[in-house]
Amino acid sequence: MMGRAFAAVFRRELRLAWRRRGQLLQPLVFYALVMLLFPLGAGADLALLGQAAPSLLWVAALLAVLLAQGTLFSADLEEGGIELWVTSGVSLGWLALAKLIAHAMIVSLPLILVGPVLAGWLGLRGEALWVLAASMALGMPVLCWIGALGAALTLGLPRGGILLALIVLPLYIPVLMFGAGAVHAAVEGRPADGALLLLAGLLFLGVSLAPLATAAALRVSQE
Amino acid sequence: MLEARELGCRRDGRSLFENLSFKVEVGQLWLVRGANGSGKTSLLRILAGLSPAEQGELIWQGEREPVLWVGHRVAVSAGLTARENLEFMAALEGDEIGASAAALEAVGLGAFSETRAGRLSEGQARRVALARLAFSTRRLWLLDEPLTSLDETSVNWFETQVHRQLDRGGAVVMATHREISDSLQGWTLQLGA
Amino acid sequence: MFHRFTALSSPRRFYAIASAWLPWLSVLTALGFAVGLYWGLIVAPPDYQQGEAYRIIYVHVPSAWLSLMVYTVMAGAGLVALVWHVKLAEIAVYECAVLGAWFTALALGTGMLWGKPMWGTWWQWGDARMLSELILLFLYIGVLGLHNAFADSRKGARVAAVLALAGIVNIPIIHYSVEWWNTLHQGATVTRFDKPAAHSSMLWPLLFMGTMFILYFSTVLLARIRVRILEQEADRQWAEEVRRG
């Protein structure tokens, strides 16, 4: 029964995402736009740009993920879906895990694919591109899950957007540091595997704790 | 089946109800009645385990079991078709998915089974959620104003399902404004008296 | 077990106990601070490198300790609030967040004051502890903002409790990541005072001040919870009686 419920939630999320796939492109366009803004703002100083590129790529991706969070549970709240989850008798953390994994795939995958392209555009070459892709593959899901927790916490608040950013951004710091750190290392020809391993650690921590915290927040939202 | 002992509920520093005690037994229908804002929904949500019982307690006879909850918001997702919605509910509640098509026929939505729920009327969406009464195996049904925006045929179908549930050893607690047919009179819980 | 627990945490009982203890605690705290400040600012010897300027540690270091300790207390109260729905714990979450934010701000402010003569700059990016402290301040602000966003303060407290618990898991990670980032970019971290230099004649007043800060925190927390109880229970009969005196 638990497996069936998990699969049902997972399939439902992918199906809903596919039906509004146009919206999935928005974070990508945002990502590209921000990456265009930085050079325009900084002037065409290529050396400076190359130095800052790893941080810029990561900060912009982080903001793109953040923007994709706000409405994560709002339809579930308005339609009563969360009530269905809570009363279903299946562990809420388990259902949240299904939703979070689907959500991480839906939001992260496009960004992970586009990241290296934008990096090439900014002048990153060779191994740095692979390290960027790897660091994003490990880090973006964690950002999604922290953001999902923020979305669950601010659920039902009329102007939750800025508050969401306020509570989520401090928690994003370790991921940003390890992620951008890995790419910096690769650009400077140092080994990046230390930072990538740390990101992998965060990924495991995230997948085990985020569903529990999100479930707790969803339960409180119903009280 | 389920006993409520001295339940109390406060909202915004105001007491909605206090010292509410009753016992829902197998085969019983309970009607929760009262004016708007008298706490009908709050009571049902406490029974469903959605809200904590801040005063008093709920005692299950035997092990605590999951209930069937159809709230004011019926948990029908606008982006899924009527059939997909019903199948999702069945999967989550551990019921037979195969029974969905027949259940939709029974509530008169056979022709709409592949229609996105966002295009259904409010009454139709409610019927999608209620269609699972046809196959739900849960022993306790908690329904919050299930008859809102239902037509006469659907109300008749609904009453048949309640009869069936009571006959097979289940129980139903529902809040409603509407008068229901004489064949369905049960215990009444008047709030805000 | 649960029943006894809720009985002990009854707001009314708590109000009575807090009212009885507060005068004593207040006097003790005031005396303790007088002794601790005199000890730290006048009796303790000057530092052989930093002269008199180092004496700010008697406020700075206890504030930094408390900023972390209060977060732990807040998360603990949050756990109790979430699991047992204890009203007192809900109130404690919010009041801890307020006090914790102040301790954090004090630690940051005194750190900057100290940094100016020591490093010649108010803000030193190379210092991992300052950076962690700043992030901690943001975590507190998040808890406060989230709590205040809800019209129903009980619900706000429980939502804030979830965030506090998420934060307590993150604090060590954040601290580690900041240190990691630091060693990467700045080389060796700037250490403020070498370990052997912390002579026991300086250490004892520091530990004493730390204890006094804990006492101060407990006193103010108790007083604040007491006021908040009266606010939340305003429509109860006993609160009415208290108000009339």
Image: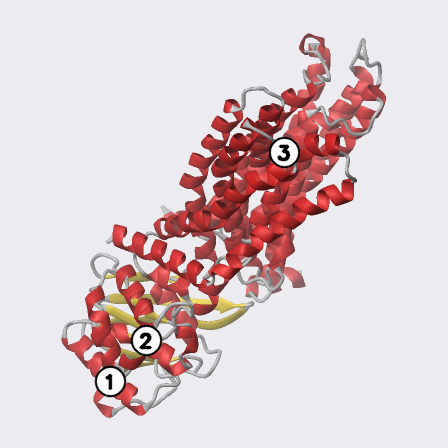
Query: Which label sits in the foreground, 2 or 1?
Result: 2
Can you identify the residue that label 1 sits on?
B157
- Distance, label 2 to label 3, CA atoms, is 50 Å
Q: Chain of mark 2?
A: B
Kindly identify the residue that appears in the image at 58 percent across and 67 percent down: C235
Disc 3 secondary structure class = helix
Q: Specify whether disc 1 shares its chain with disc 3.
A: no
Can you identify the residue that label 3 sits on?
A54
Q: Chain of mark 3?
A: A
The spot of residue B1 in percent (x, y) is 22, 66
Dividing the image into 4 quarters, which one contains the C terminus of chain C?
bottom right
Q: Is residue B18 visible?
A: no
Horizontal relation, residue A175 to residue C125: left or right: left
Kindly identify the residue that appears in the image at 42 percent across and 40 percent down: A207
Q: Amino acid at mark 3?
A: Pro
Q: Amino acid at mark 1?
A: Trp
- Distance, label 2 to label 1, CA atoms, is 13 Å
* Residue B128: image tag: 2
Query: Which label sits in the foreground, 1 or 3?
Result: 3
